[in-house]
Image (cartoon, coloured by chain):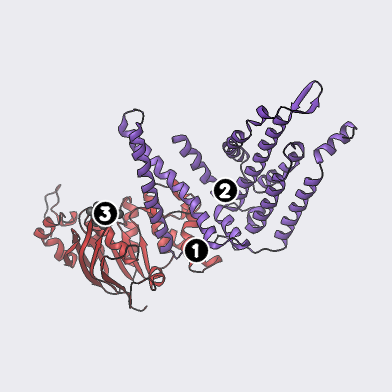
Amino acid sequence: MSHHIVEVRNLRHVYPDGTVALRDVSFRITHGESVAIIGANGAGKSTLLLHLNGFLTPTAGEIRIGDYPLTKATLPEIRRTVGMVFQDPDDQLFMPTVYDDVAFGPLNLGLSGTDVEQRVKDALEKVGAGHLQEKPPYNLSGGEKKRVAIATVLSMSPDILVMDEPTDGLDPHARRQLMALLREFSHTRIFTSHDLDMVLELCSRVIILHEGEVRGDGPPLEIFRNDELLARCRLEKPLSMQGCPVCGGKVS
Amino acid sequence: MASIDGALLDFKRLDRLATGDTAIHRLDPRAKVLATLVFVVTVVSFGKYEVTPLVPFLIFPVAMVALGNLPVAYVIKKIALLCPFALVVGIFNPIFDREVLVQIGSLGITGGWLSFASIVMRSILTVGAAIVLVGVTGFPGVCLALERIGMPRVFAVQLLFLYRYIFVLTDEGSRMERARKLRSLGKKMEPGIFGSLVGHLLLRTWQRAERIHMAMLARGFTGEFHTRRDTRFGGRELLFLLGWSTLFIILRFLNLSQLVGSLVTGISP
Ligand SMILES: Nc1ncnc2c1ncn2[C@@H]1O[C@H](COP(=O)(O)OP(=O)(O)OP(=O)(O)O)[C@@H](O)[C@H]1O
Ligand SMILES: [Mg+2]
């Protein structure tokens, strides 16, 4: 798969209880783009991301990753390509120790011995969790869990990184660390976030989701200057684009 | 609930003990699983009234605990936690079976008490061996071994999931219990609320289990087991298995404690 393109066409998802979480979503993300999907609570962001890895099946519409449409046959290959970090890290950690959890993916990829060790060490180092190696995941703090969950995905060296609220629950230092990591990652990145300052800093493109539909799609500055659009979608400007409440200075 | 939760959390510790790095830990899981199977089968094959011949079998769990560097107090506590089930099974024997089988001075021991003691002894041994096995192998290792020995893969995977989901269930349970306590102001739970709580709990467990399964699939899980160590069944494993099996069989057909007893007192049985 040479080009890590993510394409969603007329995606619609209705949950079994009748909730229409996604009405009609279309976009195309090309290789190397860094895209934020933002929107109010319940806008359908998590639902959308779960489709990119085949965990939810579209009620209607189509998803293409790279050159392939997402089907049962291409699923294993697509799951190898797309690394997914869930919103709730408890969903992602299931082995007795942090080490085993991070090693789970590489072992399934068929690596062994020192290769696995190296990958685990690198991944934990990147999220600043090297010292947690031998701890059981269920005894970690919320932010530590989040970092380990991210490491479990990094250790598989995915070509496309998909994260659901990656900075949720991280302390300022860990947040900075993660932002540096995301900036370094040269492949396609897609994440949702309520941390709009991070979005502004990291993304080349922002997609606004509201009530299961795409309401805005463009460069972050353009999107965040559109007050009317933001208000309609229950969003606000990033703090760094609002006037400073302390010194009264006006930016942007 | 809180105490059950605590006990189960404690069981997770068992899994972590398996990350130790002793000679026993390094053995191929198959050797340990097979030796434990032989152990359990021999122990269970003893007659209903036999107690003393079972005593020497303690050497197996004790040796594994010592060599595997497992915390003794912890293992004993875990065995004590599971043994009440055996007590329930055996408790009626002394009532129904009053025939005196052994006479020590003026004290007559009935068959009921003998068989009760035998059941307790056998449960201590088998439960102990199982706990020690998980402690030095880890549950994934045990499943891997079962699969390599010949259990169909689907069963082995199911077993592994079952084990995980017990933890998921208790996690969810303790969270819900905490949430309920916070808002119930110390009141006892009404039956109706209990019912809805249980229903809710099963749904939540099922959903979380499904999400964890997704996470496993996302990381390339295809139903194949991998453990941290890559081991093969070599000479040491063969020695371990044959050594222990031989000992068990000798102990099965030779009443060692009686032999020692008669040597000491000079009376033959
Ligand atoms: N399993 C489910 N069954 C039924 N409805 C669901 C389910 N999961 C989510 N929903 C509903 O679908 C809608 C979209 O949910 P989703 O989780 O995608 O929102 P989100 O944008 O990720 O919100 P947040 O910012 O709070 O994470 C919500 O209205 C939610 O109630
Ligand atoms: Mg969400």
Mark 3 vs 1: CB contact within 8 A: no
> Is A147 or B203 nearer to us in this picture?
B203
The type of residue carrying mark 2 is: Leu
The quadrant in which residue B230 appears is: bottom right
The type of residue carrying mark 3 is: Asp
> Is A164 or B160 nearer to us in this picture?
B160
Q: Is residue A76 above or below residue B160?
A: below
| Circle 3 chain | A
The answer to whether any part of residue B96 appears in the image is yes
- On residue B110, the disc is none
Q: Position of residue A50 (x, y in %)?
A: 32, 62
Could you say which chain is coloured purple in the image? B
Please, what secondary structure does the residue beneath circle 3 have? loop
Q: How far apart, in angstroms, are the residues tagged by discs 1 and 2?
A: 24 Å
Whichever of labels 1 and 2 marks the residue nearer the N terminus, that label is 2
Tell whether circle 3 marks a residue whose Cβ is less than 8 angstroms from ligand 1: yes
